[in-house]
Image: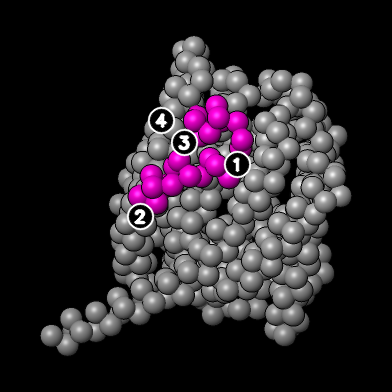
Amino acid sequence: MRRRRESDAGSAGQAREILRLAVPAFLALVAEPLFLLADSAIVGHLGTSALAGLGVASAVLLTAVNIFVFLAYGTTAVVARRLGAGDQRGAISAGVDGIWLALLLGTLGAVGTALFAALLVQVFGAGPDVAAEAVTYLRWSALGIPSMLVVLAATGVLRGLQDTRTPLVAAVVGFTANAALSLLLVHGVGWGIAGAAIGTVIAQTGMALALVLIVVRGARRLGSSLTFHGAGVLRAARGGIPLLVRTIALRAALLVTTWSAAGLGDEQLAAHQVAMTVWSTLAFALDALAIAAQALTGKTLGASDVEGTRAATTLMLRWSVWFGAALTLLVLVLHRVIPLGFSQDPDVRTALAAALIVVALGQPIAGIAFILDGVLIGAGDTRWLAWAQTAATLAYLPMVLGVRLSGAEGTTGLVWLWIAFTGFMTARALLLWWRARGEAWMVVGAER
């Protein structure tokens, strides 16, 4: 009886710890895609070409930024492991190396995106009016790429230190500033789609400065070095390669989806842009538990607590399925309401409403994929993740190419495209579930 009470108390404590990390992460992650949602709503009133152009530019920009998401994920895992092993100073030092790496990669990414903006947009095969809007947005947005990557790295440091509240505050303030600036610059000053990009750049820069200042204060308090260390930065870069491969494979799947949508027509591409933005918003919401999973898995394995790791994984997996089901119901209720806020075009509204039904039905599957992805990232099982994501993307290519080559058009084509994308998420979830059932990923200690 006593042992059972201790077990129940341990489970309750674990649940509280998960919620302590997940709730602020949930609010922050929901706020982050609102940068794009705000731009979509504001730019959508400029016309269908502007909204479709935003869709193409956003696909390129998010790819340029999110292929480096290992700056957040990898940093979270490394910092959490060292924290669990009792090395707080080493944890901060690893985080500082990650921030320096983010600044270097961000600068290179900004230059490359600005120089090749027109070429990148041409890949999608959009019409001339849409392409012109996309290039304008992309070139201005490139200025914010260094700040975006620094935000990723600094957020990873704080999450690894089991602090998800500070990134929440930064995200809420940043979103508020972005919405106000975009509205002012697009419709007040009259800068059009360029104003939306400039507003986002200013907001992201402010977020980066605020988060770096907090990390710097922590480093100084512990006596950690803030100077550039080539060996440490190189180690952070090398450790991030498998996650980079994983992310490139994932972004490839998202890009080929947008490419397929572009072949359905401007109205369908505009509808797809909003549908993907809604899906991304829901993904960020579901990813809150995955963020908690990264931080907790790294910490418990760093402390050699295999039993605690397994128990937390089981609990979070159960929660993610129920959360996904709740999001399914929410989107189904709102699938005809959401399009009203993004376009005046009836064809766009009809296509978007239909696509959102498929988006809704796939949420429980997405919940499984995201939580197990977070657990394995926290465990540092990055080489396997790179292989699994590549396999899922290769399995998806025949599905999405089949939609593009089938001749399906209009709303019907967009619905089939989203059905194929749900098939991709199913393949991803099954691979991750198979891996999590075993024990090979549960390596303990400060270093994997």
Percent coordinates x, y for residue 306 in the rendering: 35, 68
Earlier-in-chain disc, 1 versus 2 = 2
For the residues marked 4 and 1, what is the alpha-carbon distance in whole angstroms?
Answer: 22 Å
Question: On the image, which quarter does residue 226 sit in?
Answer: bottom right
Q: Would you name the residue on which mark 3 appears?
A: 353
- CA gap between label 3 and label 2 equals 19 Å
Q: Nearer the viewer, mark 3 or mark 2?
A: 3
- Magenta span: helix, strand or loop, mainly? helix
Does the segment drawn in magenta span residue 332?
Answer: yes
Q: Name the residue under label 4.
A: 419
Kind of residue at badge 2: Ala
Foreground: disc 1 or disc 2:
1
Which mark is nearer the camera, 4 or 1? 1
Judging by the rendered image, the residue that carries numbered circle 2 is 326
Closer to the eye: label 3 or 4: 3
Instruction: State which region is magenta.
Output: 329-352
Position of residue 109 measured from the top left corner of the image (x, y, whole percent) = 78, 44
Image height check: is 118 above or below 88?
above
Instruction: Find the distance from the CA under tag 1 to the CA under tag 2.
Output: 23 Å
Secondary structure, mark 4, is: helix
According to the picture, the residue beneath numbered tag 1 turns out to be 342
Side (left or right) of 299 relative to 196: left
